[in-house]
Structures are given as C-alpha cells and as structure tokens.
Amino acid sequence: MVTIPSFFSWSGGKDSCLALHHACAAGHEVRHLLAMFDEDGDSSRSHGLPLDLMAAQARALGIDLVTARAGWADYEAVFTAQLRTFAAQGITHGLFGDIDLQPHRDWEEKVCTAAGITAVLPLWQRPRLELAREFIGLGYRAVIVCVDGRYLGPEFVGREFDDALLADLPPGVDACGENGEFHTFAYAGPRFSQLVPWRIDTVETIHGPKAYGQTPYHRAAVSLAGR
C-alpha cells in the first residue's frame, strides 16, 4: 500500500483517536501529532491536558508529538506556520477529528490550503452515536476530563466513556460531545502499545470569557500517574 505522509491535529480525545484509527487503516502515515498549547505551555488548548500526559500518549501510539504555543489572538498564525514547516518536510495531508461542524472544517481547509496541504476528516458526516459506539466497540478507552456546566455536572468528570455513560447522558447532550458538552482523554486501545496511566488530582470550576457568557466549566487537573 502506498502511504500518505500526514500530520494529525491532535486533541488527545476520543474523536481524534478514532479518526487516527481510520486514517491509518486508509493508508495515512501519520508522522506527527500536532497539539496546540497555551502561551505558557502548561496545558493543551483543546482539552486542558498537561504536556507530560500527552507525550506519554504519543509514545504509546508510537507517533512523534509536536507542540506549539499560542494565544487565541495568534492561534491561526502559529498553527499555519507549523503546517508550512510540515509541508517543507514532505507532509502532504492534514488529519482532523471533526464530525459535522462546518465552520470547523472551513477553518481547517483554509489553514491547510495556506500551507499547501490537503485537509482530511475521516469521521466527517457519520452519525455521532454510531461513532461513540464504534469507539467503545473497538476497545478504545477514554475518560471525561472537562464538562460544560450548562449541560453536565461535575460528577461526570472522571467518568469512563462507555456504554453506561452514554445511557446516563441527559436528553439533549450529544453522545460525542460535539457541541462542546464534554471533552475526553483517550488512554488505551488497539493502536496503543500500552495503557497510559493517568490520575485526576482535583476538579475545579472555571468560567469562560465574557464572549461565551461566563460559561462554567468543570475541569479535571489530570496528570501522568506513576511518576
């Protein structure tokens, strides 16, 4: 099989993991996982995960982790610059885990085009509940690390993403959390060489920027266990 040199825009969550699974099966040679971090490099922009935990996840997947720091104001510029670096290294495709949010796809295609890379979304337009059940059925494992307090209480933080969780989600909460209801960290499964040990140290409630109506988020401080 001819392989396709690619990078993955990586959150560390279940959708990224399932999209990676399908991309690799389709012939993509994923050379890098690109994770965007805050300005201090303390936690990932997408799911608030620490660097050592994401590095352990990347090692278990056998893929190089590349990180970049950015604020929201310069996020696109930093992201695009890293994509141009990838393109100069021979990367031709960029992989993303989005399911059906068109503005996300529009942005991903824009930044990839600016770098001369083709955007690919392996999960695009598939039914959300079907994807959630496939992730579980394939034997992948993930834990909820953050929830939007408008939809879920702090008791959901730390729960396994499994059939029991899907049954407990309130009406109106998407099975994949695609509307931002919750975020996950994937730590085991068919493409992992070993389980990534994790622990939740604390759960805190934080509030989003005013642009998001001071939305409360219940977020876990997750760390690499066994250090």
Image (tube, helix red, strand yellow):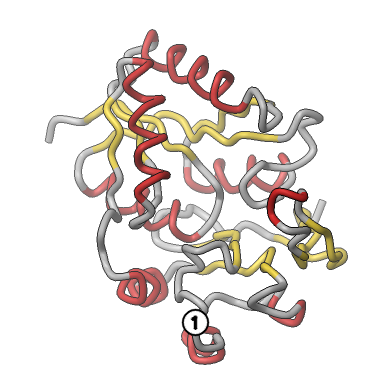
User: At which x and y percent is residue 199?
Assistant: 77, 64
Q: How many numbered circles are shown?
A: 1
Residue 183 is drawn in which quadrant?
bottom right
| Residue type, label 1 | Gly
User: At which x and y percent is residue 216?
Assistant: 77, 65
The residue at the point 52 percent across, 32 percent down is 34
Q: Quadrant of the N terminus?
A: top left
Toward the viewer: 139 or 170?
170
Q: Which residue is mark 1?
A: 172
Residue 27 sits above or below residue 167 on the image = above
User: At which x and y percent is residue 66?
Assistant: 57, 28
Residue 194 sits above or below residue 133 on the image = above
Q: At numbered mark 1, what does the secondary structure look like: helix, strand or loop?
A: loop
Residue 147 is drawn in which quadrant?
bottom right
Toward the viewer: 158 or 174?
174
The residue at the point 77 percent across, 50 percent down is 210
User: At which x and y percent is residue 187?
Assistant: 57, 60
Residue 23 sits above or below residue 38 on the image = below
Image position of 127 (left or right of 1): right
Task: Judge the density around disc 1: few (<14), some (14-19), many (≥20) Cα neighbours within 10 Å.
Answer: few
Image position of 140 (left or right of 93): right
The residue at the point 56 percent across, 41 percent down is 59
Q: Residue furthest top?
A: 88
Image position of 223 (left or right of 124): right
The residue at the point 51 percent across, 18 percent down is 82
Toward the viewer: 15 or 57?
15
